[in-house]
Amino acid sequence: MAHCPVLLAETMNLLDPAPGGIYVDGNLGMGGHSREILRRSAPDGRLIGFDLDTDAIAMARRNLAEFGGRVEYIHDNFANLPERLVELGIDEIDGLLLDLGLSSYQLDSSARGFSFQGKEPLDMRMDKAQDLTAAQILNTASREELADIFYFYGEERQARRIASFVVQERRKEQFITTDQLVALVARAVPRKFQPKKIHVATKVFQALRIAVNKEMDNLLRILERGPQMLKNEAKFCVISFHSLEDRLIKRAFQSNPSLSMVTRKPVIAGEDELRRNPRARSAKLRMAKRETL
């Protein structure tokens, strides 16, 4: 399956993988960024890849098979990075990369409801072993809880109105598939308030995915805990895809006394990449470096 890792050249230039180094890819996905880390850190650099999605790990294993024992695959949340590294006998690393976006597979082929195109189950779980799904949130959360999810995680200005429509609709019929939610959001948001550049349901889908997977909680944990595992001068790179994430990353990098902010402004995709991969339009890359103690 084709996959275009976003901001690949820019990320590698900042992360600067070198032979003998130990690097962590906190969102392994299909292995696009990891492949380049391994290539640049040859012949003996190591890559520890985390992912909650077992399908993604299986595909990454195939895509990175040529690198053999230089790769360690971990089915876990990157927030648990310190504990998992200790289990591997690793007490510090040379670089940490987080790509917080969804992969092409998850959006187009996973049939888990990440995309609002078509008709799929309202699932949205990264880890299929967990219980909570998007459908359960829509069918059980209170009007106030739904409004908070849509507003705080999706920055959706019509959050209260959409939440009211959800509560009214589920009294008649439970939410099961993505097309139900898309149709409801289109009805709930007055036409004059519907966005011009993105789909009307984009922010609601983003908010539900974040809530299902506790993405903000886990991002805050790794922003706090990740720097503890970095060697002196090691790099911490994060690619985010919406302003809520980017603000948290910027604030965490600036407030951590053990880090120095390298990218004063986020790195964004150039015109060539945007032509090849329109999904890179919202990607923002920030990098901080561990100060020498």
Image (tube, rainbow, N blue to C red):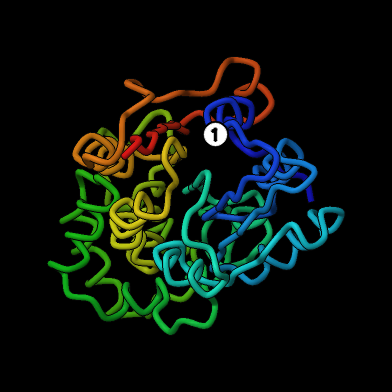
Name the residue beneath numbered marker 1: 15
Q: Nearer the viewer, residue 91 or 71?
A: 91
Q: At which x and y percent is residue 194? A: 32, 37
Q: Residue furthest left?
A: 144
Q: Nearer the viewer, residue 160 or 211?
A: 211
Q: Quadrant of residue 58?
A: bottom right
- Total marks placed: 1
Can residue 197 be seen at all in this image of the molecule? yes
Q: Is residue 130 above or below residue 25?
A: below
Q: Residue furthest top?
A: 271
Q: Is residue 199 above or below residue 169?
A: above
Q: At which x and y percent is residue 264? A: 32, 21
Please state if 275 lies on the left or on the right of 179 as rendered.
Answer: right
Q: Which residue appears at 61% of the width and 31% of the height?
A: 12
Q: Nearer the viewer, residue 24 or 166?
A: 24
Please state if 200 lies on the left or on the right of 112 as rendered.
Answer: left
Q: Which residue appears at 87% of the width and 54% of the height?
A: 66
Can residue 186 be seen at all in this image of the molecule? no
Q: Residue furthest right?
A: 66
